Amino acid sequence: MLRLSRHQVCACSSLLVSLFALTACMNPGQPSAPPLPALATPFVAADTNLAAAINDADLTQIALATLAQTHAARSDIAQLGTVIVKNLTDNRTSLVALATTSKATMAEKPFTHSQKVIDQMQHLHGATFDKNYVRYLASSTKTTIAHLDAESVASKNTDLLKISGDLKTKLLGYTMQIQ
């Protein structure tokens, strides 16, 4: 039989203790870390163009609807103005949040040609405002939908396409309400 010396037993014991300690370190009993969330991909040119078109439509319609609340003679137009402001502000908030995660910024003011319309409507009141507002809402809905459809063709961002679709649906609904 093989007899170990005291020195050999001590050396083996410390080796065994070290192995047990290393085994404990390899499996500490804690769950593994969750995977990192996927980073949002930046907008491509098509997404940026679509987002800019949505943003301009939102800003323009919000500004005109705000005017409708105080400038309209018809109560249905004034009430619809309140609904439009709320709905399109929510729509724009979603758009800005999506753009921010995609490292894009949205303009705070409408395009120049849209601002001209807002400036012209600002000076109208009563029945004249109503007539021009109804006419503008109907014509801008058609052109906005056509523009959004054209910009949507190249976009692959499903969240942005949903926001665009929501805007088109809302604009059609508003136009139907005041015809």
Image (spheres, rainbow, N blue to C red):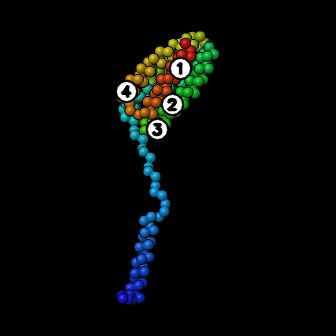
Classify mark 2: residues with Cα within 10 Å, few (<14), some (14-19) or many (20+).
Answer: many
The residue drawn where x is 52% and y is 30% is: 91
Residue in front for this viewpoint, 77 or 30? 30
Q: Position of residue 56 (x, y in %)?
A: 46, 26
The residue drawn where x is 46% and y is 30% is: 162
Q: Earlier in the sequence, mark 4 or mark 1?
A: 4
Q: What's the residue type where badge 2 is placed? A: Arg
**Which of the labelled discs sits on residue 173, or is there none?**
1
Whole-Å distance between the Cαs marked 2 and 4?
A: 21 Å
Residue corresponding to mark 4: 153
Q: Is residue 159 above or below residue 131?
A: below
Q: What's the residue type where badge 4 is placed? A: Val
Tell me if residue 66 can be seen. Answer: no
Residue corresponding to mark 2: 92
Q: What's the residue type where badge 3 is placed? A: Thr
Q: Earlier in the sequence, mark 3 or mark 4?
A: 3
Residue in front for this viewpoint, 138 or 110? 138
Q: Secondary structure at mark 4?
A: loop
Q: Point out the frontmost of discs 2 and 4.
A: 4
Q: Earlier in the sequence, mark 3 or mark 2?
A: 2
